Structure formats: C-alpha cells, structure tokens
Image: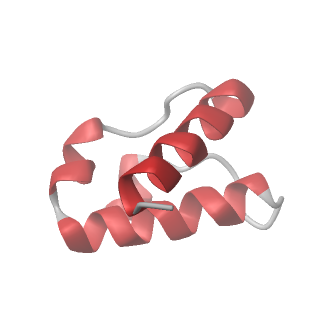
Amino acid sequence: MEDETVLVMLVQQYAKQYGITFSSKHLDDPDKKAKLISLIQASLSGKHGPVTDDDLN
C-alpha cells in the first residue's frame, strides 16, 4: 500500500475519534509527516492523546 493511502486511512480513523486537532500544513513537511503518522498510530492505539500542533513543533 502506498504511503499516501496509509496516511489518508489513518487520518480518517483519527478524525472519527478525535476530529482534526492539528494543522494540515504539517503534511507538507516530510519529517513532520513521518512524526504525525507515528503520533496518530500511537493515539489510535491508546498510547497518546489527541495530536496537536505542539506535538509537531
């Protein structure tokens, strides 16, 4: 599966649970995108709360 497809699926799952709690501008930065994916996965598994811009800065 392509990275973008995985990202879209993760964001959809995350948004159902928390809404969107971070700025989409972070998706334009490859390093922040990788961190965002990791944080979303942790959030969905219950190891992290909602992801905020502060988590990505």
Q: Give how far across and how far down residue 30 sits, in percent.
A: 21, 68
Find residue 42 and report its horizontal and vertical position in percent.
69, 66
Residue that lies at the very extreme toward the front in this rendered image: 1
- State the image quarter where residue 55 is shown: bottom left
Tell me where residue 53 appears, x and y as whole percent: 36, 49
* Camera-nearest residue between 6 and 53: 6
Q: Is residue 4 left or right of residue 16?
A: left
Viewer-nearest residue: 25 or 30 = 30
Instruction: Please tell me which residue is depicted at 49% across the width and 34% down the height of the picture.
Output: 21
- Left or right: 4 as drawn, with respect to 18: left
Q: On the rendered structure, is 43 left or right of 27?
A: right
Question: Image point 81% across, 61% down: which residue?
Answer: 45
Residue ID at (75%, 53%): 44
Q: Does residue 52 appear left or right of residue 43 in this picture?
A: left
The percent coordinates of residue 11 (x first, y second) are: 53, 40
Please give the name of the residue rendered at 26% of the width and 50% of the height, measured from the top-left corner: 27
Above or below 43: residue 11: above
Is the residue 32 above or below the residue 23 in the image?
below
